[in-house]
Image (cartoon, rainbow, N blue to C red):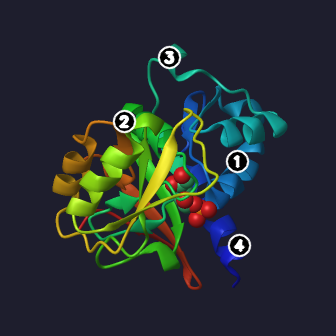
């Protein structure tokens, strides 16, 4: 199976978690894009979707799915999104597409976070994928110095401006032993909007695409 076939299979499997008659939260990235295509087939059976990025909002609308402002939603049963890395505790690194802050906001509101990933994303220890950090532009040098003190190598993502008008610094070379602690410590640096660790609010389940079928993982 190709990686795209794996992504499509896991996107289709996620439909089983969508609650009919409700709003669904939709993530960002190539796996989420496969999910949007699957979601479109449900038509009026969902009330609409909350988008985790401008790119996702646009794609949802192109597929005829009505997009709802998160502030107009009083409950969000499910959020479906991909990940750059996920471990056996279902903690993740996200933000490869630069949408980490809005993704984290939608995930915080959702009752259930369903991570959809192909098997290449499952890792024993988070950190091989550079950890994205969204930074207020005037704080770039300050934040980069503070991040370097944590042991990684901060690199500005060239040419990337987030949907919120900010910069992304990718922190390379980490081996993350305590993801909850690191998520909190980075978020306390003044000038950081948020970082791409989803450890304080991990996924509730992970649908993992393998050549042998889609497996359901729950936290170890
Ligand atoms: C975007 C994300 C994505 O979920 C993550 O990058 C995975 O993307 P893909 O499904 O394309 O591998 O966090 O900010």
Which SS class for mark 2? helix
Q: The N terminus appears in which quarter of the rendering?
A: bottom right
N-term mark: 2 or 4: 4
Report if the CB atoms under discs 2 and 3 are less than 8 Å apart.
no
Q: Mark 1 = which residue?
A: 36
Nearer the observer, 100 or 49 = 100
Mark 1 neighbour density, 10 Å: few (under 14) some (14–19) many (20 or more): many
Report if the CB atoms under discs 2 and 4 are less than 8 Å apart.
no
Nearer the observer, 157 or 45 = 157
Q: Mark 2 = which residue?
A: 108
N-term mark: 4 or 3: 4
Report if the CB atoms under discs 1 and 4 are less than 8 Å apart.
no
- Report the image quarter containing ligand 1: bottom right
Residue 34, percent across and down? Answer: 70, 57
Q: Mark 4 = which residue?
A: 4
Confirm if mark 4 falls within 8 A of ligand 1.
no
Report if the CB atoms under discs 4 and 3 are less than 8 Å apart.
no
Mark 3 neighbour density, 10 Å: few (under 14) some (14–19) many (20 or more): few
Which SS class for mark 1? helix
Confirm if mark 1 falls within 8 A of ligand 1.
no
Residue 37, percent across and down? Answer: 75, 51
Which SS class for mark 3? helix
Visible in this render: residue 93?
yes
Examine the rendered structure and indicate whether residue 79 appears above or below residue 97: above
3D distance between C-alphas at marks 2 and 3 = 13 Å
Q: Mark 3 = which residue?
A: 71
3D distance between C-alphas at marks 2 and 4 = 28 Å
Report if the CB atoms under discs 1 and 2 are less than 8 Å apart.
no
3D distance between C-alphas at marks 1 and 2 = 20 Å
């Amino acid at each position: 199976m190709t990686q795209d076939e794996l992504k499509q299979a896991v996107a289709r499997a996620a439909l089983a978690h969508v609650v009919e008659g409700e709003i669904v939260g939709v993530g960002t990235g190539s796996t989420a894009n496969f999910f949007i295509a699957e979601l479109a087939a449900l038509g009026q059976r969902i009330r609409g979707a909350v988008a985790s990025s401008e790119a996702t909002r646009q794609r949802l609308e192109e597929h005829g799915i009505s997009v709802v402002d998160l502030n107009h939603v009083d409950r969000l049963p499910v959020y479906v999104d991909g990940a750059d890395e996920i471990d056996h505790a279902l903690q993740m690194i996200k933000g490869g597409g630069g949408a980490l802050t809005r993704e984290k906001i939608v995930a915080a509101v959702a009752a259930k976070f369903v991570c959809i990933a192909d098997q290449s994303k499952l890792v024993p220890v988070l950190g091989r994928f550079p950890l994205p950090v969204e930074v207020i532009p005037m704080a770039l040098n300050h934040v980069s110095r503070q991040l370097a003190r944590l042991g990684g190598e901060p690199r500005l993502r060239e040419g990337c401006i987030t949907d919120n008008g900010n910069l992304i610094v990718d922190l390379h070379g980490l081996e993350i032993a305590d993801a909850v602690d690191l998520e909190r410590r980075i978020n306390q640096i003044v000038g950081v909007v948020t970082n791409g660790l989803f450890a304080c609010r991990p996924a509730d389940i992970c649908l993992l695409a393998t050549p042998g079928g889609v497996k359901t993982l729950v936290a170890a």
